[in-house]
């Protein structure tokens, strides 16, 4: 790795994930009946537990900023996070009288997961809970899941914008991820128009992007990137996010990989001058990278692991193509182990896998106009910037 390696802070949603092993029993509510299931797992989830701890496993010693309640769940989460005290900077406050968040994750083989979630004090987090932990040495602030945190998305994201504006005033690159299951009845496109000018790196999944912008497109199950209309839908949505003010958009496509689109404006991406040698080399990028081959054991946290890999590349001063490959490799390591990011190794190992396996992605079939870049080993879109020629 070649960069200056400025620190990354991760802030936002934190919860306790309770994951029972259902096996073939599945899950059916049957009042009055007791069912025998397997062992349960208890882990720190949300942006802090997923993206934050993945960065720790990559060896980047992130700063983790969040709030918890002073209840039993909060105490357990403090204990869990404390186990990583030698590889993270903990900036966690427990709020007296508040309840902490938890999720009951029910998943049986061959079935979609069902999640029962209590959001706890995540709903009351405001900019002031985070701002005091921002320091000039930070290179990146990543905020996760604001669309399920009521105080952060209220009034068209006023608190979130205040936080991100302060970070950018300190020349800290801002990154925002969303969560599935955003509340109904919120004007999300209007909220995004308010928020995205303060977001340098927007990293939603395809379904989250559609919901946030209020756009149509193929479902996750139907998505076929060899179809020109499907790739055009992704490009159109990413361009809309850029038009709303985002600096770049990394769309997570699950088992189909990821799509990156960046602003053509050097002025919009000037914050990258704090991280990379040539910020202009990131302008006008359109990159697609498929998922790396992996022996899938558990997909929990794969999207957040991809974000961690991408931000790690940014923090180390890497190119856009290398950052995407780090994202794909981190996600591949994540899905090969049960328990979120527990299988993600140090960054150098992640990069080594990315370099070795990215060549396999040349065999993918993409619409006319896309071409395989022999130098950077990724797919380039039909509208490359001058820096890609």
Image (cartoon, helix red, strand yellow):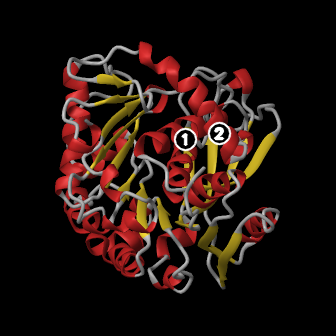
* Residue 276, image x, y percentages: 44, 59
Q: Secondary structure at mark 1?
A: helix
Mark 1–mark 2 CB contact (< 8 Å): yes
- In the picture provided, is 341 more to the left or to the right than 177? right
Q: Nearer the viewer, residue 137 or 338?
A: 137
Above or below residue 246? Residue 89 is below
Crowding near the residue tagged with mark 2, few <14, some 14–19, many ≥20 C-alpha atoms within 10 Å = many
* Residue 92, image x, y percentages: 66, 76
Task: Tell me what residue is drawn at x 38 percent, y 63 percent.
Answer: 272
- In the picture provided, is 301 more to the left or to the right than 18? left
* Residue under numbered circle 1: 326
- In the picture provided, is 292 more to the left or to the right than 84? left
The image quadrant where one finds the C terminus is top left
Above or below residue 227? Residue 337 is below
* Residue under numbered circle 2: 350
* Residue 360, image x, y percentages: 51, 18
Q: Nearer the viewer, residue 184 or 211?
A: 211
């Amino acid at each position: 790795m070649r960069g200056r390696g400025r620190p990354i802070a991760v802030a936002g949603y934190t919860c306790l994930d309770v994951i029972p092993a259902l096996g073939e029993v599945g899950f059916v509510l049957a009042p009055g009946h007791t069912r025998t299931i397997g062992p349960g797992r208890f882990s720190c989830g949300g942006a802090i537990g997923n993206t934050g701890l993945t960065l720790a496993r990559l060896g980047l010693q992130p700063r983790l900023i969040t709030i918890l309640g002073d209840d039993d769940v909060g105490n357990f989460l403090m204990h869990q996070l404390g186990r990583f005290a030698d590889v993270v900077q903990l900036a966690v406050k427990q709020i007296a009288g508040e309840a902490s968040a938890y999720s009951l994750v029910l998943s049986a083989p061959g079935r979609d997961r069902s999640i029962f979630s209590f959001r706890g004090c995540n709903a009351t987090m405001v900019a002031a809970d985070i701002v005091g932990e921002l320091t000039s040495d930070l290179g990146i602030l990543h905020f996760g899941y604001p669309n399920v945190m009521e105080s952060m998305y209220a009034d068209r994201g006023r608190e979130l914008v205040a936080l991100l504006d302060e970070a950018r005033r300190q020349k800290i690159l801002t990154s925002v991820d969303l969560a599935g299951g955003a509340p109904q009845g919120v004007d999300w496109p209007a909220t995004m128009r308010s928020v995205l000018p303060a977001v340098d790196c927007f990293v939603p999944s395809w379904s989250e992007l559609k919901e946030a912008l209020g756009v149509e497109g193929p479902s996750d199950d139907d998505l076929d990137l060899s179809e020109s209309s499907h790739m055009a839908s992704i490009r159109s949505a990413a361009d809309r996010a850029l038009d709303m003010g985002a600096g770049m958009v990394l769309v997570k496509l699950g088992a189909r990989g990821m799509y990156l689109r960046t602003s053509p404006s050097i002025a919009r991406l000037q914050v990258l001058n704090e991280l990379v040698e040539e910020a202009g080399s990131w302008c006008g990028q359109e990159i697609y990278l498929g998922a790396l081959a992996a022996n899938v054991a558990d997909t929990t946290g794969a999207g957040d692991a991809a974000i961690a890999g991408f931000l790690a590349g940014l923090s180390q001063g890497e190119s856009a193509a290398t950052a995407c490959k780090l994202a794909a490799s981190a996600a591949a390591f994540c899905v090969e182990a049960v328990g979120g990011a527990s299988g993600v190794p140090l960054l150098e190992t992640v990069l080594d896998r990315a370099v070795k396996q990215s060549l396999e992605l040349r065999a993918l079939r993409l619409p006319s106009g896309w071409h395989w870049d022999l130098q950077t080993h990724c797919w380039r879109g039909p509208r490359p910037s001058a820096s890609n020629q």
